[in-house]
Image (cartoon, rainbow, N blue to C red):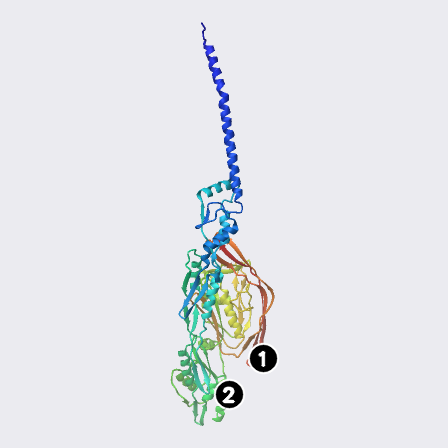
């Protein structure tokens, strides 16, 4: 009989456990090795899959409804052109009361943006390292990726086509006038002008053609406005009636006899033109009256009469003549028709004081004017930065021998006065909101050109950093006051014996703004001429494009226009009535070259 002790039992059990361990270990090792091999094989397969589509679109990638799976760039591009070629088939129709004009989509380069769509499709799954690309490949193949189609067009070409058509419809108004023909006054009727406002259809078309679902035909009404002439037929007719009264024969019946100032003599002193208050009137220039009265005085056996008076629009504006002549002219100006006085002819030497001239300024003659167009935009505070200084200068009087200074007349700029942020040239580039009162240079340039053409002695003037084609070449004038206190102004001196009245006028027609300055004074007979601008050292500008995510995809925004650099010289010559040279001055402008820049959304 065999007896099993507890110790022997423990030994048997221990041997049994030791016998199972090698099998489990082998199974675990085999499992891990198999898993590792499977992973390596899978990764290798996925890597091979990724390499298979290098330079081609991954499976599962679509643009809209077009499947580009596995296609190379050439084949994918061809398929996109076939699918979305209709985006380039269409037209824009501009309608006006007098007709219409058509712009084809081909004219503005509208069509599928194949290059942008290809770049996006080929880029799917190509970002990151190898493992990240493998994961992206699998996700793309399993889920698919659908991208939005893109459309492209040339916004500058679209705007230019519309503006060109609008310009073709424009017609300058023709002022009414009065002409003296064989002792008769003949009225030439005024004709209204036309102005087509391209801003409205340009804005609408730019929005519509950028849409993928834009229809094949887009129609826009091009607003056409009537522009009244500065001088209407009614104003010219009224001036004619005044002229007929003013130039009727004047009979001087003295005790010693009767003499007359003939109608033909008065007509030789008469002219027609704008007045400072915006009207149109006859002006009777009686500068030669002292000689006529001297002759009459001799015939009447009395002392010579040295009198001088000046009338404008039927109103007496400067008088050193007898009370009888004043009353006669006043009566005629009021609509009466007296033709006889009984004077005691006396003569005083003519004298025109500054006070008399200032009181007479609404009656002085227009001798010069200049108008500047500008697009109303954020670059000029939507017109405020140009119209406010024009309004401040309006009515400004420059005394004889006094100097006009732009900043003295305008005063400091501030938001309290209504100025807004506007464009400024900073570090050689345009900043649309770079400075308070930006755009004010349209005002200073306009005033400079009006004074320049009036023949006055010019003072401070400086050209812009680069040439702006809304201004006369070589005759622009910038103004500024920098943060450091440096200042650039425009100035001129009234080097005559008569006061000068400046009228500043600002207005808008549709989306276009205008500023005009007019110079009024007693006519001095000066004649102003300019040389042809001499252009040297032209430095041609280039244009650039920059893609940005700050704009909607497919849209564009012009930041800077290309401008050629150049040096320009213009010479002005001012002569008096007899042809003698009073002023000869040369204006030199050195314009920088500006590289164009357009932002395109991506």
Determine if residue 564 is in view.
yes
Residue wearing tag 2: 291
Residue 90, position in %: x, y?
Answer: 44, 61
Which one is in front, 43 or 527?
43
Q: Residue furthest right?
A: 537
Q: Which residue sits at x=50%, y=89%?
A: 294
Q: Is residue 396 above or below residue 48?
A: below
Which one is in front, 349 or 91?
91
In what element is the residue under mark 1?
A: loop
Which one is in front, 127 or 316?
127
CA distance separating discs 1 and 2: 24 Å
Residue 517, position in %: x, y?
Answer: 48, 71
Determine if residue 548 is in view.
no
Q: Residues within 10 Å of mark 2 (few under 14, many from 20)?
A: some
Q: Nearer the viewer, mark 1 or mark 2?
A: 1
Residue 403, position in %: x, y?
Answer: 53, 71
Q: Residues within 10 Å of mark 1 (few under 14, many from 20)?
A: few
Counting residues from the N terminus, which is met first, the one under dot 1 or under dot 2? 2
Kindly identify which numbered label has been placed on residue 580.
1
Residue 544, position in %: x, y?
Answer: 54, 57
Q: Residue furthest bottom?
A: 256
């Amino acid at each position: 009989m065999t007896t099993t002790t507890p110790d022997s039992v423990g030994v048997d059990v221990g041997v049994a456990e030791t016998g199972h361990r090698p099998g489990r270990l082998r199974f675990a090792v085999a499992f891990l090795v198999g898993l590792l091999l499977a992973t390596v094989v899978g990764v290798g397969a996925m890597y091979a899959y990724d390499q298979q589509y290098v330079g081609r679109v991954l499976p599962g990638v679509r643009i809209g409804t077009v499947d580009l799976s596995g296609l190379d760039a050439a084949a994918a591009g061809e398929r996109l052109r076939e699918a979305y070629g209709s985006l380039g088939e269409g037209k824009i129709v501009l309608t006006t009361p007098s007709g219409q004009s058509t712009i084809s989509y081909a004219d503005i380069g509208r069509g599928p943006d194949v290059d942008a769509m290809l770049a996006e499709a080929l880029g799917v799954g190509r970002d990151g390292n190898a493992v990240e690309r493998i994961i992206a490949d699998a996700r793309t193949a399993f889920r698919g990726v659908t991208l939005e189609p893109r459309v492209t067009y040339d916004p500058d070409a679209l705007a230019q086509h519309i503006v060109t058509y609008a310009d073709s419809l424009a017609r300058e108004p023709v002022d009414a006038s009065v002409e003296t023909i064989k002792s008769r006054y003949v009225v030439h009727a005024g004709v209204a002008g036309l102005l087509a406002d391209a801003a409205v259809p340009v804005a609408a078309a730019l929005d519509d053609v950028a849409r993928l679902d834009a229809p094949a035909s887009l129609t826009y009404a091009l607003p056409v406005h009537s522009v009244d002439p500065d001088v209407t037929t009614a104003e010219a007719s009224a001036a004619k009636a005044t002229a007929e009264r003013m130039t009727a024969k004047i009979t001087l019946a003295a005790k010693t006899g009767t003499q007359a100032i003939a109608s033909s003599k008065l007509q030789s002193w008469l002219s027609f033109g704008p007045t400072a208050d915006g009207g149109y009137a006859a002006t009777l220039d009686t500068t030669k009256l002292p000689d006529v009265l001297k002759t009459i005085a001799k015939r009447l056996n009395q002392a010579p009469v040295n009198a001088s008076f000046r009338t404008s629009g039927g109103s007496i504006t400067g008088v050193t003549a007898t009370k009888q002549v004043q009353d006669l002219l006043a009566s005629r100006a009021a609509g009466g028709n007296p033709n006889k006085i009984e004077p005691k002819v006396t003569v005083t030497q003519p004298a025109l004081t500054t006070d008399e001239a200032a009181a007479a300024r609404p009656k002085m003659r227009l001798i010069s004017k200049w108008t500047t167009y500008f697009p109303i935009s954020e670059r000029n505070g939507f017109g405020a930065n140009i119209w406010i200084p024009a309004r401040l200068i309006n009515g400004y009087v420059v005394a004889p021998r006094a100097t006009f200074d732009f900043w003295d007349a305008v005063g400091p700029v501030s938001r309290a006065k209504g100025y807004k942020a506007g464009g400024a040239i900073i570090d050689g580039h345009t900043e649309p909101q770079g400075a308070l009162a930006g755009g004010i240079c349209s005002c200073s340039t306009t005033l400079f050109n009006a004074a320049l053409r009036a023949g006055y002695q010019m003072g401070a003037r400086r050209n812009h950093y680069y040439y702006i084609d809304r201004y006369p070449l070589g005759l622009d004038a910038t103004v500024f006051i920098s943060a450091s206190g440096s200042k650039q102004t425009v100035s001129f001196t009234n080097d005559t014996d008569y006061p000068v009245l400046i009228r500043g006028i600002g207005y808008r027609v549709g989306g276009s703004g205008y500023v005009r300055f007019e110079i009024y004074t007693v006519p001095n007979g000066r004649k102003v001429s300019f040389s042809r601008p001499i252009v040297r050292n032209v430095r041609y500008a280039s244009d650039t494009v920059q893609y940005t995510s700050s704009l909607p995809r497919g849209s564009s925004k012009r930041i800077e226009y290309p401008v050629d650099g150049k040096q320009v010289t213009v010479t002005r010559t001012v002569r008096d009535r007899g042809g003698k040279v009073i002023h000869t001055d040369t204006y030199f402008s050195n314009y920088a070259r500006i590289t164009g820049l357009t932002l395109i959304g991506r």
